[in-house]
Amino acid sequence: MRMPLLMGAAVGLTSAAALVVTGGPAMAAASGCHGTAFYGIPGSFTSRCTSGSGYYEAIAYCSANPTQGSAFTYIYGPTVSVYSSVSSKAKCPSDKKYLQGGTTAVL
């Protein structure tokens, strides 16, 4: 489960680790992706990838105030396979119900 991140917050890191993954010819990324924003209350962002292989997820940028600019929280939808018949939907929680935007993360 991913925890929402607050943009603009000061975060101190005491150590960092890098993970490098290499793939052979069988690994390919999801493609043919598009997203749909719903600016109602609460807002949501839905992503769908229709070609390639691999996984993707929707990420919604949500805030407590409709005019809050860059102070928003990342909300992640479920990780979905390109071969799945469902989309990934990230829905803003009740305390940060205003959608500021969104994106599709190809994993």
Image (cartoon, rainbow, N blue to C red):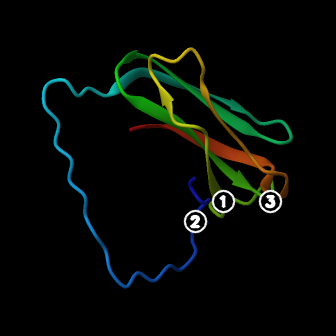
Q: Residues within 10 Å of mark 2 (few under 14, many from 20)?
A: few
Q: Amino acid at mark 2?
A: Met
Residue at mark 1 = 72
Q: Residue at x 60, y 20 (%)?
A: 86
Residue type, numbered disc 3: Ala
Q: CA distance from mark 2 to mark 1?
A: 6 Å
Q: Left of 107 or right of it: where is 17?
A: left
User: What residue would you read off at disc 3?
Assistant: 64
* Dots 2, 1 in contact, CB < 8 A: yes
- Dot 3 or dot 2: first in sequence order is 2
Marker disc for residue 7: 2
Compared to 57, does 82 lie above or below? Answer: above
Considering only vertical position in the picture, is 60 above or below 67?
A: above
Secondary structure beneath label 1: loop
Look at the numbered disc 3 and give the secondary structure of its residue: loop
Image point 23% across, 28% down: which residue?
A: 27
> What residue sits 58% from the left and 75% below the top?
9
User: Measured from the top left, where is residue 53 in percent x and y?
Assistant: 34, 21
**Percent coordinates x, y for residue 3 in the rendering:** 60, 60
Q: Quadrant of residue 39?
A: top right
If you read the primary sequence from the N terminus, does the residue marked by circle 2 or circle 1 appear first?
A: 2
Residue 24 location (% of width, % of height): 13, 31
Residue under the image location 13 percent in, 25 percent down: 25
